[in-house]
Image: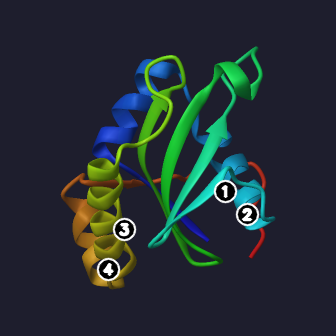
């Protein structure tokens, strides 16, 4: 399983002090069927706890996900800022999911080279395939 963040999500991680190890844990949970909603079109919603708090006071993340293959963290927000995506946002993320899930290895390499994507390399524990 390869795990990626978008440029936007990387900034979100920095602002919210969200580490790569936490993202690996999130994907491991999703691989085991633990998520907060399949939004369709390859999108998963997953709660992520803030450091020192539970998931209730944490973040919501939107992940483009293909079981056992690739995942892309594309969006995150605090629950106190918004509760869910609206219909327009959801449709835009579904289009993005279709794009990312259709990427060839060469396209991913290009996106990494251009810093549009970053691969999560902090794998203290490998994600189960």
Q: Is residue 22 left or right of residue 87?
A: right
- Kindly state the secondary structure of the residue where label 2 is placed: loop
The residue pinned by badge 3 equals 97
The residue pinned by badge 1 equals 27
Q: Are marks 2 and 3 in contact (CB under 8 Å)?
A: no
The x and y percentages for residue 51 are: 69, 19
Is label 3 or label 4 in front?
Answer: 3
Residue at 81%, 65% in the rendered image: 32
Residue at 52%, 17% in the rendered image: 80
The residue pinned by badge 2 equals 127
Upstream in sequence: badge 2 or badge 4: 4
The residue pinned by badge 4 equals 103
Q: Nearer the viewer, residue 48 or 123?
A: 48
Quarter of the image where the C terminus is located: bottom right
The x and y percentages for residue 7 are: 29, 44
Marks 3 and 4, how far apart in space? 10 Å
Q: Is residue 125 left or right of residue 80?
A: right
Q: Nearer the viewer, residue 113 or 38?
A: 38
Marks 3 and 1, how far apart in space? 16 Å
**Is 42 rendered above or below residue 19?**
below
Residue at 57%, 78% in the rendered image: 69
Is label 3 or label 1 in front?
Answer: 3
């Amino acid at each position: 399983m390869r795990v990626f963040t978008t440029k936007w999500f990387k900034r979100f991680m920095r602002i919210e002090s969200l580490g790569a190890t936490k993202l690996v844990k999130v994907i491991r949970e999703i691989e085991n069927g633990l998520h907060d909603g399949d939004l369709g079109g390859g999108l998963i919603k997953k709660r992520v706890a803030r450091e020192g708090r539970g998931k209730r006071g944490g973040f919501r993340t939107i992940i483009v996900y293909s079981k056992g293959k690739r995942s892309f963290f594309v969006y995150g927000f605090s629950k106190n800022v918004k509760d869910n995506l609206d219909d327009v946002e959801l449709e835009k993320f579904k289009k993005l999911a279709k794009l990312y899930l259709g990427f060839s290895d060469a396209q991913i390499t290009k996106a990494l080279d251009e810093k549009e994507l970053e691969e999560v390399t902090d794998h203290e524990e490998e994600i189960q395939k």
